[in-house]
Structure formats: structure tokens, C-alpha cells
């Protein structure tokens, strides 16, 4: 059963979040599906509940800019945009600080993190009461439209999440503008609630990654994960390994193959949720430990395609793809 909470029950919603449960909450754009971003199992639960076939990097929500900038490195451009547009529908992609508490799964293994301060009093009160960074994509099943009411959330995710904090319809109804500030020039990753012209008035020209034709733009919005750079280890990855060489690092799932130079088990018990929480940490660790021992690559054992397995396999396939 999914609890339907009123703004008067905000403390209950905050407690659930801190306990690792999933709580949908209103923002000025759409309803978000929130989880404690530090908690890998909670974050894996987001992908499970949404039925997402990809681990897209999630936006982390904070009650104010200083809380966000404690986790990511903000340059002068980021501070100017934050001062002008936060709270508001602008998401900034910035480099993670070494002390960043957000779990790797929430950022899909990347060294960057998307952060935002939403302009919604209930969202801000919830974030303040929870006192943790909250990772939140839109609170809909994968492939469905983004929800702008608690009713929409329950239609898609009822029974799959702990609670929805109902504070009526969202005002903007389109998602946040996503701006990448990790390179020399700012790049628009997704158009949204803050017009790019308003950002250009502040920063000067903004690069676009989106294809210009309407059809291509629609296709890219349906699968935003396809546009993103993704984490890939330095060592080549070999998929569906049924045996492993002594000069290979092993990414195991279930009972491990014998004979690898080094091994990391995604889940000894074959639990896909556990495997999701250990995927990016494991690839990073094997890359480092395997390279240190002169391994020629990482051999990945097969992972079943069911549930979170589809998202795990998608990321493994990307990690194994030829490098451009
Ligand atoms: P959603 O959570 O459904 O609103 O989508 C979040 C979007 O934010 C993704 O599809 C990406 O476009 C973008 N995003 C989040 N994190 C990153 C990141 N580290 N690098 C680039 N884009 C990101
Ligand atoms: Mg979405």
C-alpha cells in the first residue's frame, strides 16, 4: 500500500526518506520519485519502481545552493546561475567533490552530478526535514508521461512506493532545464522550465547537444540516456564470460568462476537489487585493482535480463562497446 500524505504529515515523509523508502513529492516542474541519494539500495529501488531499462544519472535535490555546492564543485558560472535561478527549474551538472556523499549509482558511475534546488515550498520543507540529498527522477513508470498530480503518481506507481506527498498539481509541468557546466563552455543537455535564452543572458552563448529536427528531438527525449556520456572503465570489458583467464579481472554474479587475478562479486546470492548497488563501485574497483596487477581486461559473468538485470546489462554493454 502506498501512503497518501498531506503537507501536514511532512515529517512522516521525511522519516520514510531517511529510512531508505521511496517517497514521491511535488516540485514546481513535476512530481519527483525521491530516495536518500546516499543509500544505494534506496536508489536501486527508484530504478526498480520505475521499471527503467537504463541507469540514467539522477538529479539530486537540495534545500539551498550551499547544500548542493558542498557535494559538487561550483565555479563562478554555477554560482551566478544559482543566484539568479534557484530555487527554480534549472539543473546544473558539475564535478563531484571527493567528499560527495551521493552514491555512485545515483550518478550512474560518472564523476559529475546533476543538482538542483526546486522552487516549491513543500519540496523545500521536505528536503530540509529529511536533511539528506534526495535523488529524484520523475515519479512515473518508464515510458509514461511525467506526473503533475498525486493521482498520476498513484496510477503509475501505487503499491510500488512507500508514499506520495500530495500537495496538489504542479505549476510548471515541464521538466527542469539541464545545463552541463563541466566543460569550457556551458552545454544545454535538456531544454526545460528555464529558457536557454535566459541562461545566455547571464553566461553568453550556450552550446546545444540536441538534434534540431523535431522528430529527432522527440526521439532523444524519449530515451535521454542515449545522449549521455556514460561511465566506462579503462580496461576492456568482455561480456557473458563462462570462463576466466588468470590475467583477467572478474565481475562475478552468483557463484564466481574460479581462476581470476582479482574478483568483485555483484551479488554472491544472485540478488539483482544488490547487484545494482555494487555495479559502478565494482567496475571502478576492478579497473584499478586489475590494472595494478597487469590484467588485460575485465570478464563479466552473465546477469539475467529480468527486472533490474536489464539496466545492469545495458550499462555493461555500454562499458564493453568499442571506444570512439
Ligand atoms: P529525469 O530524472 O527523468 O528528470 O532526467 C534526468 C536527466 O538529467 C537525465 O536524463 C540527464 O539528461 C540529466 N543528467 C543527470 N545527471 C547527469 C550527469 N551527471 N551528466 C549529464 N546529464 C545528467
Ligand atoms: Mg522522466
Image (tube, rainbow, N blue to C red):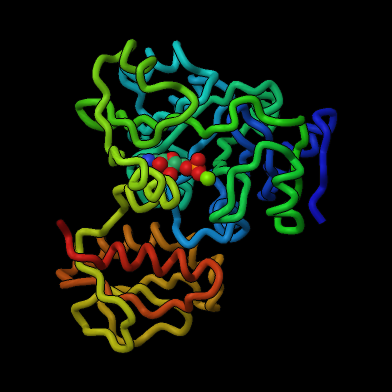
In the image, taking residue 129 as reference, residue 243 lies left or right, namely left
Where residue 126 sits: x, y (%)?
69, 30
Query: Could one spot residue 30 in this view of the protein?
Result: yes
At 42% across and 62% down in the image, what residue appears? Answer: 279
Query: Could one spot residue 292 in this view of the protein?
Result: no
Specify the quadrant of the image occupied by residue 5. Answer: top right
At 69% across and 44% down in the image, what residue appears? Answer: 23
At 56% across and 51% down in the image, what residue appears? Answer: 43
Quadrant of the rendered image holding ligand 1: top left
Q: Name the image quarter holding the N terminus.
A: bottom right
Where residue 61 sits: x, y (%)?
54, 32
Q: Vertical placement of 269 versus 243: above or below?
A: above
Which residue is at the front of the view, 221 or 204? 221
Q: Vertical placement of 86 versus 236: above or below?
A: above
Where residue 11 sits: x, y (%)?
79, 33
Q: Vertical placement of 258 versus 63: above or below?
A: below
Q: Vertical placement of 127 versus 12: above or below?
A: above
Specify the quadrant of the image occupied by residue 295. Answer: bottom left
Which residue is at the front of the view, 226 or 131? 226
In the image, taking residue 258 as reference, residue 1 lies left or right, namely right
Where residue 78 sits: x, y (%)?
36, 20
Specify the quadrant of the image occupied by residue 244. Answer: bottom left
Amino acid at each position: 500500500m502506498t501512503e497518501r500524505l498531506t503537507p501536514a504529515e511532512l515529517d512522516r515523509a521525511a522519516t520514510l526518506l531517511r529510512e531508505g523508502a521511496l517517497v514521491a513529492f511535488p516540485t514546481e516542474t513535476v512530481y519527483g520519485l525521491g530516495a536518500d541519494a546516499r543509500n544505494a539500495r534506496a536508489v536501486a529501488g527508484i530504478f526498480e519502481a520505475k521499471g527503467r531499462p537504463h541507469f540514467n544519472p539522477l538529479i539530486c535535490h537540495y534545500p539551498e545552493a550551499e547544500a548542493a555546492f558542498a557535494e559538487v564543485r561550483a565555479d563562478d558560472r554555477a554560482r551566478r546561475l544559482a543566484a539568479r535561478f534557484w530555487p527554480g527549474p534549472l539543473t546544473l551538472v558539475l564535478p563531484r567533490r571527493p567528499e560527495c556523499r551521493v552514491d555512485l549509482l545515483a550518478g550512474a558511475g560518472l564523476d559529475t552530478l546533476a543538482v538542483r534546488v526546486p522552487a516549491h515550498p513543500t519540496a523545500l520543507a521536505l528536503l530540509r526535514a529529511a536533511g539528506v540529498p534526495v535523488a529524484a527522477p520523475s515519479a512515473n513508470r518508464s515510458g509514461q508521461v511525467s506526473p503533475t498530480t498525486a493521482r498520476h503518481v498513484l496510477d503509475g506507481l501505487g503499491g510500488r512506493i512507500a508514499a506520495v506527498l500530495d500537495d496538489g498539481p504542479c505549476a510548471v509541468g515541464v521538466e527542469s532545464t539541464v545545463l552541463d557546466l563541466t566543460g569550457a563552455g556551458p552545454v544545454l543537455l535538456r531544454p526545460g522550465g528555464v529558457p536557454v535564452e535566459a541562461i545566455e543572458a547571464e553566461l553568453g552563448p550556450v552550446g546545444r547537444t540536441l538534434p534540431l529536427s523535431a522528430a529527432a528531438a522527440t526521439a532523444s527525449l524519449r530515451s535521454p540516456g542515449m545522449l549521455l556520456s556514460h561511465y566506462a572503465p579503462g580496461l576492456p570489458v568482455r561480456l557473458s564470460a563462462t570462463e576466466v583467464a588468470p590475467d583477467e579481472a572478474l565481475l562475478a554474479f552468483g557463484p564466481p568462476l574460479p581462476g581470476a587475478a582479482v574478483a568483485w562479486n555483484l551479488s554472491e546470492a544472485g540478488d539483482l537489487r544488490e547487484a545494482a548497488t555494487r555495479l559502478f563501485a565494482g567496475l571502478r574497483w576492478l579497473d584499478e585493482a586489475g590494472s595494478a596487477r597487469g590484467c588485460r581486461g575485465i570478464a563479466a559473468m552473465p546477469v539475467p535480463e529480468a527486472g533490474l538485470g536489464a539496466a545492469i546489462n545495458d550499462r555493461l554493454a555500454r562499458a564493453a562497446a568499442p571506444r570512439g
